[in-house]
Structures are given as structure tokens and as C-alpha cells.
Amino acid sequence: MTISFETKQQNLADLAVALGVNLQEGQTLIINAPIDCADFAHKVAAAAFDRGAADVAIRYNDERLSRMRYDHADLEALTTIPAWQKARMDSYVDDQVAVISIYADDPDVMAGVDVDRVKAASNAAQAAAKKYHEAVINDRIRWCVISVPTVGWARKVFPDIPKSAAVEQLWNAIFETTRTNLTDPAAAWHRHNASFEEKVRFLNNKQFDAFVYKNALGTNITVGMPKNHIWAGGSEIAEDGIAFFPNIPTEEIFSAPDKTRVNGTLAASHPLVYNGQLIDHFALTFKDGKVVGYHAEQGFDALKSLVEANPGSNMLGEISFVPYDSPIQNLGILFYNTLFDENASCHFALGAAYPTCIEGGQNMSETELAAAGLNISTTHVDFMVGSKDLSIVGLDAEGNETPIFVDGNWANPL
């Protein structure tokens, strides 16, 4: 059966609403979207109203205007967040809205921008959104990130073909990885969700003390784990007891490392787009949890601004397993988009840990979370380290070894 392009688009909109945020009747939906994605945002809004939404609001962002502001606006204007903007973000939490964010940035739009100005503006925005950020990482609201093509993004991914063909190919890749090219995407996602359960159960039962990563790119690191850590993958359960999928697509099983027990070097296997700037061929060296050295062949200043962004941005907050033989990796496409590239590769994140990754974490204060070994930060930036030859070994408290990944994939019989 041939499924039309329009049906696949509608499938993605429906999936984001019904499974992504699992919108409930009478609930309000907020859609964050680039202005270039207005047509698709309207499809999501229509799907939400069809499901019984009380209201839908679309908050558009304009990366070209953002670039103009970084280049020309007064620094005070860039770093002053109006009270109404903070109040709006706080209201998302107070009103228990659901939030769908469409992430479709042009990876080159911020090339050459002053990274210090971007860093200052980003820190101000993150500080103003602290209540919302805490709600997201604690699953106090239901949220979902999806992506749809824009011309700028598509031309970066497929630079050697006409822009219309590039957009079409990117749509096809998105339909493939989100399973929206199937006759029953929801059923496919429920099956996919079940596929995480056995490995999540294994990792949670084993409670490994640490993991050792090695590959030919230069990764050689030992990452300690906090006591009573929790692994998760696929759907999550929000504070209100309702299941949702934070990312569509998703292929990862993740947890939070012990922020103080990280020693060695992580070499990135994919480029990273951070604050609109490309960082490529980079590596980070850690000692007792903190970044003590780093280099990048491209985007060094952007990498420096990430590592120095705020307290905690120089420590790890997430550890994530993704097999090299995964649906996204097997497409052979470098997406220049963290939502897709992180789900094609084992990865870590600099910055905040998810409190849901430790027993009782959602009821802990920041001081208690830090004492338990979890990293506190206002940033959370994923970077990819997975490769075809990646080896990961789990160590128990006595130092006994269990293979977790061999040649980039789950070890048998995992």
C-alpha cells in the first residue's frame, strides 16, 4: 500500500500529539516552531484540536532575526529578558500545558557570530527559564521534540542536489526514522517501546559501578555511576502518571553518571551544532569529573563557550547507549541535528542530569542531587561518541567486567 506524502506528514503531526505529549482532553498545547515550519505547526495544532485540546498556541522563532540581533543589538538588550517572557515560561508549568518543540535549525546560520554575545544571551535566557527547565528535566510536564525540514537544514545535509530534492530527501529520512511511513505508526511505536524493556531491566538490575569506553578515534575513559541510578529508554512517565515520548525519534537508553568519577578522554564521532555554530573533530579530557582539556578542528570558540557556559557545563550529566547498527545510523546520513544524530550514536551530555535517573531524584533538592553525584546546570548539550569499533565494558563494585558493547553494538547475549 502506497502512503501519500500528505498522509505521512499527518501521521507525524498525530504521533507528536497522541504519543509524543499524549495530549489529554481539555489540556492546552504550546507549539514552539521556526517560522519556516508554520505549515506543519498548523497540522500539529489541528491534530491537537481533533484530540480535544482546550487551546493551542504557537510560539514562533526566527533564527535569521536572532542572527541580526547577535550581530547588531545592544548587549544589554540581548541579556535582558522581559518579565512577561519569564512569566509566560513559568505559566507553562503552573498551567500544566503540554509542549511540542519543532527543532529545525540551519546549522550554518550562526557561522562567524561573536560566541561571547551568544553565550551571554543564552545564559540570560536559561536563567529566565529555570522553572520551566526544572519542570522538563523532572517530567513535571509532558514535552516532545520533533523535527521537520527547512531549506537551510536540508541543503546542509544534502549539499550536492537542488534544494527541492534536498527537502524531499530529508522528509523521507524523517518519515523513515519516525516510522510515520507505516500504515499504523502508533502500533509500530508501541512495539519499538517494548524493545527497550529487556536491556533497561538488565542495566537497572546490575547497577554497574562504572563503564570503560575505548575506540580508535581516541576515546579512552572510565565513567563512574551513582548508587541507585536508573536507566530509561523509550517512553517516560510524567509526574501526573501519563506516559509520553520526549523525543521522536528515539533509539537511546540513558542514565546519569556520577559527575565526580569521570576520568579520561572522549573523542566526538559526529559534528555538534551548539547555539547555531558547528563544532567538529573535537575531544574533551576529564579529570575527577571536570573538563581539563579540549580541542576542536572547527568551532573551538563555540566549544570553549559551551565548556565555560555556567557552573556544571564542564561536567557530564547524561550517559546514553545507542547501537551503531540502529535505524538512523543505517541511513548513512549525517543530519547536523542533535535529535537525529544522538539517536544514531552512543553519546554523553555536558550539563544537567535528569533527576529521574536516580531513585527518589524528583523529590530531591539541587543540593541533595549534587550530593548523590548528579550534575546541576542550566544547560544540557548532547555530543556523540559512538563508532563502529566502540567497546564498552561494565565494571561492578569488585571490578568484575561485563561486555556491554562490542564493535559498536550491544554485546551478546544482551
Image (cartoon, rainbow, N blue to C red):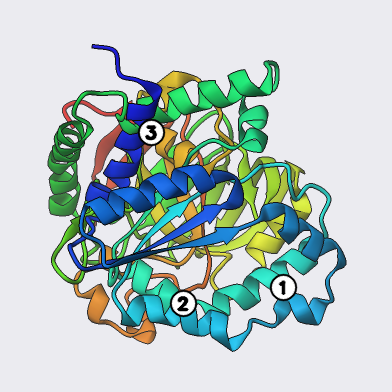
Disc 3 and disc 2: Cα gap in Å? Answer: 29 Å
Q: Label 3 amino acid?
A: Gln
Mark 3–mark 2 CB contact (< 8 Å): no
What residue appears at the point 28 percent right and 42 percent down from the top-left corner?
15
Instruction: Please name which of the two marks, 2 or 1, marks the residue nearer to the observer.
Output: 2
SS class of the residue under badge 1? helix
Left or right, residue 301 beside residue 361: right
The quadrant in which the N terminus is found is top left
Mark 1 surroundings within 10 Å by alpha-carbon count, few (fewer than 14), some (14 through 19), many (20 or more): some
Instruction: Please name which of the two marks, 3 or 1, marks the residue nearer to the observer.
Output: 3
Among numbered discs 3 and 2, the one appearing first in the sequence: 3
Residue 287 drawn at (x, y percent)? 55, 61
What residue appears at the point 60 percent right and 18 percent down from the top-left corner?
165
What residue appears at the point 77 percent right and 79 percent down from the top-left corner?
77
Q: Which mark is residue 120?
A: 1
Mark 2 surroundings within 10 Å by alpha-carbon count, few (fewer than 14), some (14 through 19), many (20 or more): some
Q: Which residue is mark 3?
A: 9
Q: Label 1 amino acid?
A: Ala
SS class of the residue under badge 3? helix
Residue 315 drawn at (x, y percent)? 52, 64
Residue 136 drawn at (x, y percent)? 36, 68
Closer to us: 169 or 14: 14
Residue 176 drawn at (x, y percent)? 37, 25
Disc 3 and disc 1: Cα gap in Å? Answer: 37 Å
Q: Which mark is residue 89?
A: 2
Instruction: Please name which of the two marks, 3 or 2, marks the residue nearer to the observer.
Output: 3
